[in-house]
């Protein structure tokens, strides 16, 4: 079951998961990615935005879970992008070089537009926050 601090909603063909907790543990991220994986498998959803506006601290163990989710998505030509990364979260992705795997957008609308048009980190069309 997903944390009560997390809301998942469908916006057209994109699923937006908004995390409202200031700290995200690896268990919370695992529950969220499990829920999103279920949507991928049973609802044929392949486009996901993780809205991290409320997140101040992301446990480093969350990164492995997110990478596994990304790899599962790549097998069905899906994508996941991040929106509203605060400075510490954006720094974590930059220092681990995972900003090359996950596009970072300034807001959800921009993320939806980018993912909907097939933008990828290598394509250079993602705006980097922070």
Image (cartoon, rainbow, N blue to C red):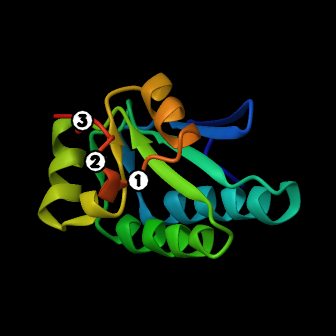
The answer to which quarter of the image holds residue 41 is bottom right
Percent across and percent down for residue 130 are 16, 34
The answer to which quarter of the image holds residue 72 is bottom right
The mark that comes first in sequence, 1 or 3, is 3
Percent across and percent down for residue 49 are 53, 42
The mark that comes first in sequence, 3 or 2, is 3
Q: Residue furthest right?
A: 42
Q: Secondary structure at mark 2?
A: loop
Q: Residue at x 58, y 38 (%)?
A: 116
The residue mark sitting in front, 3 or 2, is 2
The answer to which quarter of the image holds residue 31 is bottom right
Of 29 and 17, nearer the camera is 17
Q: Secondary structure at mark 3?
A: loop
Q: Residue at x 46, y 65 (%)?
A: 66
Q: How many marks?
A: 3
Percent across and percent down for residue 102 are 37, 56
Q: CA distance from mark 1 to mark 3?
A: 21 Å
Q: Are marks 1 and 3 in contact (CB under 8 Å)?
A: no
Name the residue beneath numbered marker 3.
86
Q: Is residue 43 above or below residue 75?
A: above
Q: Residue at x 51, y 67 (%)?
A: 70
Query: Which mark is on residue 80?
Result: none
Name the residue beneath numbered marker 2.
124
Name the residue beneath numbered marker 1.
120
Q: Is residue 113 left or right of residue 45?
A: left
Q: CA distance from mark 2 to mark 1?
A: 7 Å
Q: Are marks 3 and 2 in contact (CB under 8 Å)?
A: no
Q: CA distance from mark 3 to mark 2?
A: 20 Å
The residue mark sitting in front, 1 or 3, is 1
């Amino acid at each position: 079951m997903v944390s009560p601090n997390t809301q998942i909603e469908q916006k057209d063909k994109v699923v937006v998961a908004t995390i409202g907790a200031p700290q995200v543990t690896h268990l919370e991220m695992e529950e969220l990615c499990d829920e999103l994986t279920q949507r991928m498998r049973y609802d044929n959803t392949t486009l996901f935005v993780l809205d991290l506006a409320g997140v101040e601290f992301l446990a480093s163990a969350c990164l492995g879970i997110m990478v596994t989710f990304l790899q599962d998505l790549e097998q069905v030509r899906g994508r996941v992008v991040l929106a509203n990364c605060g400075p510490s979260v954006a720094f974590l992705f930059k220092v681990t070089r995972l900003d090359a795997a996950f596009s970072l957008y300034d807001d959800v609308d921009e993320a939806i537009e980018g993912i909907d048009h097939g933008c990828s980190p290598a394509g250079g069309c993602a705006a980097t926050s922070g």
